[in-house]
Amino acid sequence: MINPVGVSLIEAQNIASIFSKSLKVKIREGDGWYYDSSKQIIFFAEGDLSSLTYEEVVGNLLHEAGHAHYSTFFNELNWRAIPIPHRQRLFTELLNMIEDFRVEDKVRATYPYAIDFLPLYSFKTNFFIQRKMQGFEDEGIDVPPYLYYVWELYGRMSEMPISFHIKDKDIKEEVERIVDETFDYAILARGKESTQELLDVVLDKIYPLIKHWLDFPEFMCEPLRVSFTFSREKAPFYENSLKNLQGVAKLLEEKMKRLLSDNLFSHYAGAYLTGKKVNEKRLYRFGTGNFKLFERKIVAKKNNYVFALLVDESGSMTRNYGGNGENIKKAVDTAIVFSLVLEKLGIDYELWGFNTGVRQYKKAGGRLDTKIFERMFLSAWAGDSPDPENDASYNCDGFAIKTVFESLMRSPKEKVLFVISDGCPAPPFNHGERLEFELAKAEKKIKVVGFGIGNGTFSVPSFYRHNVVCDNVKELPTLLVKQIGKYLK
């Protein structure tokens, strides 16, 4: 199933008006997704209405319209316990994080079908926090304990692991202790009827335990809004991966160029009695009576390849083997590396992901949008989703192979499918195709290679005759040639 893209401005305005229950709430293009209460405007990031999927746009609109209807905003609240304005702004980081949960709970309770559009709120907010962490790191600023506390509490409330490192062991222990002590109060606040009631709980029960962390200079107190949004910016893990993987991509490019040289590039090869180029490595044979010393030009066959990259986005890629998301991170890194290489070599390729359903992120000949790597990463955290085609609790390996194989067969070019997975099928009831059967069928017509990158991918060789299994993406160039070089030629 391929998700439709976007909504029109009129549709977006209708959704905003209906769910905010106010015809005064308007839609405008801005620098991100947020609701401005003073202007009664829901802003969206430039181009998002047409570039995001229908589900993502509607999810953003529901969230911000929920704020418009259910939230009381900063200057309308009674901040009795925090008289210093810049500390109020800083404290808004905690307030807004819990308020986001409360608002979405309200939207889902009022409109049960809204869960179809808001199942990934926690995961997207998690990614937003990761971007903020990256911002601190890029600026060389130590993240204050207060923000560590907010992000750790968020992770606990959303049941999402937050990956960050606190250098000071004492601070780490203090943050974890206070999260334990305040978690129940945060849940209590989340269930309140109004923003003011939520704030009262937080001020009475949580603020006394964390106020010693709020002694910040004013310039550092701009609230880091945690909102439901798919930023148009590249995700930080993509930016980091891009930096870290350039060397690997360059080396892999050279290896794949050699493997596919018969099709990609004009070159000299062979052993002939005549020709325009002498192979100096064969000169020693002249003394033995072998006069085939010449190479002849082999003309390229006009790039006769099309590839497909298929990435496993199931929950086992995040929850198994430590549950820290390392395997999905490595899988996406692998997809990034191959995308960079294929783009550089000018080879057409498709990019797909799968869990209970199958999603096509890029068509052959289409333009690479780096936001897709963020979406891949997020899909694997989806857990029990009401969307039967995007539930990370299962993975339809057989159906995915079948779908991508049928797509590749539309091309007259030589076809290669790379599957990046942990190799463990767990098909849902609606896509029960057997992996072994679909692989055998595909391998009669195309080349298929299974890649297991990371811990727990030992079952990949059990299903994929041609495979590469390693712990680190940086091992790919060497192992690709060593283990499947002849198969790809």
Image (spheres, rainbow, N blue to C red):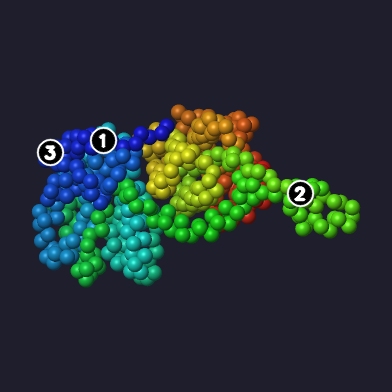
Q: Are marks 3 and 2 in contact (CB under 8 Å)?
A: no
Is residue 143 found left or right of 257 in the rendered image? left
Between 309 and 453, which is closer to the camera in this rendering?
A: 309
Read off the residue under disc 3: 22
Q: Amino acid at mark 2?
A: Gly
The residue tagged 1 is 8
- Please tell me which residue lies in front, 41 or 122: 41
- The answer to whether any part of residue 67 appears in the image is no
Can residue 22 be seen in the rendering of this structure? Answer: yes
Up-down relation of residue 294 to residue 389 (above or below): below
Q: Secondary structure at mark 1?
A: loop
Relative side of 196 to 404, left or right: left
The numbered mark, 3 or 2, whose residue comes first in the sequence reads 3
**Image point (57%, 52%), residue name:** 253
Q: Considering depth in this image, is 70 or 351 the residue closer to the camera?
A: 351
Q: Quadrant of residue 119?
A: top left
User: Percent from the top left, x then y, of residue 420?
Assistant: 53, 44
Q: Is residue 124 above or below residue 357?
A: below
Mark 1, Cα crowd under 10 Å, few <14 / some 14-19 / many 20+, is few
Q: Nearer the viewer, mark 3 or mark 2?
A: 2
Find numbered disc 2 in the image and state the secondary structure of the residue it sits on. Answer: loop
Reading the chain from its start, which is encountered first: label 3 or label 1? Answer: 1
Q: Which numbered dot is residue 368?
A: none
Within 10 angstroms of label 2, few (less than 14), some, or many (20 or more) residues? few
Of the residues shown, which amino acid type is indicated by label 3?
Ser
Q: CA distance from mark 1 to mark 2?
A: 63 Å
Label 1 is placed on what type of residue? Ser
Which residue was labeled with disc 2? 275
- The CA span between labels 3 and 2 is 81 Å
Give me the residue at 35% from left, 69% from top: 140
Q: Earlier in the sequence, mark 1 or mark 2?
A: 1
